[in-house]
Structure formats: C-alpha cells, structure tokens
Image (cartoon, rainbow, N blue to C red):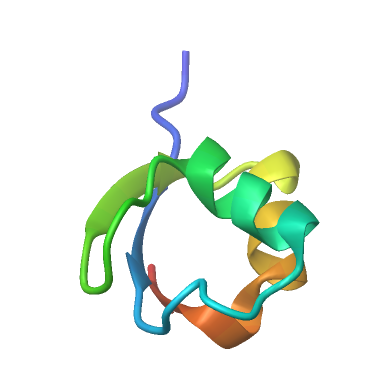
Amino acid sequence: MEKLKSMKITLVRSLIGTKKKHRVIIQGMGLRKINHAVFLPDLPSTRGMINKTAYLLKVEE
C-alpha cells in the first residue's frame, strides 16, 4: 500500500465575518485558532476544502 502525501495546513486569518459554511469546513479540518496547523492527507476531498477556504489558509506540501 502506498503512503499518502501529507500537507501542512495553517489557519492564518480569523473566522470572524466569514460564511457559516466556511467556518464549518475549517472546523472539519481540525483547525481551531489562528496559526494552528494540522497535517492532512493529500486527497481530493481535502483539496476541495482547501479550495473553498483558500483565503483563510496557508498550505505547504
């Protein structure tokens, strides 16, 4: 079985004033506070969440 590539995703902007749907997506990724980072697998579902909320995030591969 192949090992999945991982991405480091960091929340860099506040969720105040964002759409409710975007706040739910950020919560689903496991991000809580500004500058909080998580490692998620490079999957199409993760890419979709990143594309929706790209203005709030910094992504490193």
In this rendering, the answer to whether 50 lies above or below 1 is below
In the image, 35: left or right of 1?
left
In the image, 58: left or right of 36?
right
In the image, 31: left or right of 15?
left
Residue positioned 27% across, 72% down in the render = 34
Work out whether residue 16 or residue 21 is closer to the camera in this orientation and state it: 16
Of all residues shown, which one is farthest toward the top? 1
Residue positioned 78% across, 54% down in the render = 21
Image coordinates of residue 40 in percent, x first then y, are: 41, 43
Image coordinates of residue 24 in percent, x first then y, are: 65, 46
In the image, 27: left or right of 51?
left
Work out whether residue 30 or residue 58 is closer to the camera in this orientation and state it: 30
- The quadrant holding residue 30 is top left
Identify the image quadrant of the C terminus: bottom left
Of all residues shown, which one is farthest toward the front? 17
Image coordinates of residue 59 in percent, x first then y, are: 43, 74
Work out whether residue 13 or residue 20 is closer to the camera in this orientation and state it: 20
Image coordinates of residue 13 in percent, x first then y, are: 42, 84
Residue positioned 76% across, 68% down in the render = 19
In this rendering, the answer to whether 22 lies above or below 55 is above
Picture mark count? 0
Residue positioned 74% across, 45% down in the render = 44
